Amino acid sequence: MVRPFGLLLVAVAASACRPDPEVAAPLAVVAPQLTGDWAEIIERGTIRLARRSWTGFETLPSQGLSTEQYRRLAEGFAARHGLVVDWVIAADMAEIFAVLDEGRADIAVHNITVLPSREERVAFSVPLTRSREWVIGRREDGVFGVAAGTAYVESLAAHYPDADRAPVPDDADPVTFGTLIETGEIDATIMDEAAARVVVRASPGVEKIRELPELHEHAWAVRKTNPRLKEALDGYLRERHSVDEQVLAHRDWPAVQDAKRLRMLTVNAPTTYYLWRGELLGYEYELVRLFADAHDLELEVVVARDTNALIDDLLAGRGDLIAAGLTPTPPREARGLSFSRPYLSIRETFVTAAAPITDLAGLAGRRIVVNPATSHAATLRTLTVPQPFAIDHVEQSTAAILSGVADGTYDATLVDGQHAELAATFDEELTLGLALEPAQGLAWAVRENSVDLLRELDAFIDENYRGYAFNVLRNKYFVNKRRMSRQREHRVTSDVLSPYDDIVRPLAQTAGFDWRLVVAQMYQESGFDPDRVSFAGARGLLQVLPSTAEEVGIDPGRLAEPEMGITAGVKYLAWTRERFPNLPVGEQLWFALAAYNAGPGHVRDGRRLAARLGLDSSLWFDNVERAMLKLAEPEYARSAAHGYVRGTEVVQYVGDIRDRFGAYVEYFRTLDRG
């Protein structure tokens, strides 16, 4: 994927510098030092909650409660007592405990391992989860690496007192440890089972060595001098959530209500559940969350390997319902599934990359590619057509088949209409054709003996079908608005690139960016429209999510103001650049832009995959961008720490900005020459 303006790296490197820490880093909240107990908190009307910075940007929960849900749980506690939340941001575990000790926060909202040494310092809430620790790596008789201040330091001392140890960054996340093991900087580490599973899956050469015997509880923390606060918090957590239950449980509606948690089985895909800029998204995920919220339930997501595994997991009791765009079929019902009323009506649609298939006669001589495990294969076999056509079976995902149609590998395919619409939104090579009749309904699935749960799901769908909330989600995920924004072009005829150049110049200079790069990105994000709001709720000229604005110290309510929106975007771009500190300055920019679009976790997955494919993980163009494209395919997404990502969008995003930036640079060179 060779692109022009190859000399731009030199120009960018010359203009870039290390950013001002106050710009690059999230802004910590300076809170007053108050150590009063529950009565004082109630009187002042504000509760201060401490959490780690940027935690949502690095995780896609494959099972269990997410960081987002911890946050909602804590805010629910505050709302229950009429308190306003003041979030206090901490860089690491040491600072989490420090802000608590010093009276700058009232509760540490984090997955903190309960240890005797810590119980001498703080009081813990009732446990939210329990887990064991794994030793993972290449060998346990080599060099260990664990981050200072974590519970793993004590575990290492207890089980490997004589082990050699190597220093690791205090803020290293689980995937970083996988990289350290792969590169030979350390031989092993210790971490909680859930995180360890992700690392073992995502990191070739990293294996589970052993499981440590201790079962650790994880909880939130308060000062030991705040017993009334702890009492109130424990009461709320016991009511809402308390301790994780057995992984395998066949539950009907009464058991779900008692646990106050609903377990949703799904797959990691663009219409179901995925991570985008730190936000958990997906049509199925948001729809089920509406149901959970309506019944005051926490939503736990359990990600299965593929559609066949979904059914196995449901029957085994790993979840309460399947929400993954399933069509009710007799074979699925025969396996013991019951289906809800349809929540989305779809028509199977033919997709090509050239002239559309507009009627059944147009199938003559065509080769229609489908996965044999889908209902589309069965549909094709039942069609009555004037002349024969070929059916090619490939065991690939819908996304991979559509990508093959777009690049000419496959002739045509048949997919659900919503998949076709979504794919065509992001790939203009795809052409939608004949939509078959009759329409079919997508439904949620439960075990056939979950009669009460099925009744509640049906009642929810009956009440909301084609209502406001359902229509908002359908428009959000399946209605194409992006192409319209691409129709607007801004022709440059002077030294003014945008109406906001005077705002961009000083902010970009302070952060070490060429201001023209930021303008190029601004056009890509919003078309210079400060009132633009994305499908996921990103706002302003640089399309910053409200949660991101909070992280960088900007009022989310002011993102539509040009200066505030640009300030937030430049700070976030500086932060994403710092996720790749060991790259050449010029390359940092492309990786920073990719991370701005998809989140740094997905880009790091792309780098790891690039290395496995024999590509250069330090170069974006023609290397990591090629790996990013593969992360949309289940074969590769399953082994990635952060799962599915729409790689074509990321690649196009970075490429378009680079090309536009290059055009700006060349234009200004022309102006300089007079």
Image (cartoon, rainbow, N blue to C red):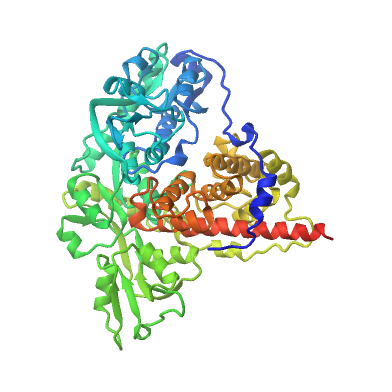
At x 25%, y 45%, the residue is 319
- Locate residue 128: give its quadrant: top left
At x 27%, y 65%, the residue is 374
Q: Is residue 216 above or below residue 492?
A: above
Q: Is residue 140 above or below residue 351?
A: above
Towards the viewer: 634 or 671? 671
**Residue found farthest to the bottom:** 386
Residue 175, visible in the rendered structure: yes
In the rendered image, the quadrant that contains the C terminus is bottom right
**Residue found farthest to the right:** 674
- Locate residue 528: give its quadrant: bottom right
Towards the viewer: 154 or 379? 154
Q: Is residue 438 above or below residue 148?
A: below
Where in the figure is residue 390, as x and y percent of width and height? Answer: 29, 80
- Locate residue 641: give its quadrant: top left
Where in the figure is residue 330, as x and y percent of width and height? Answer: 18, 64
69 relative position to 340: left or right: right
Q: How many numbered discs, if any?
A: 0
Towards the viewer: 463 or 67? 67
Residue 522, visible in the rendered structure: no
Where in the figure is residue 367, as x and y percent of width and height? Answer: 34, 79
Where in the figure is residue 279, as x and y percent of width and height? Answer: 46, 45
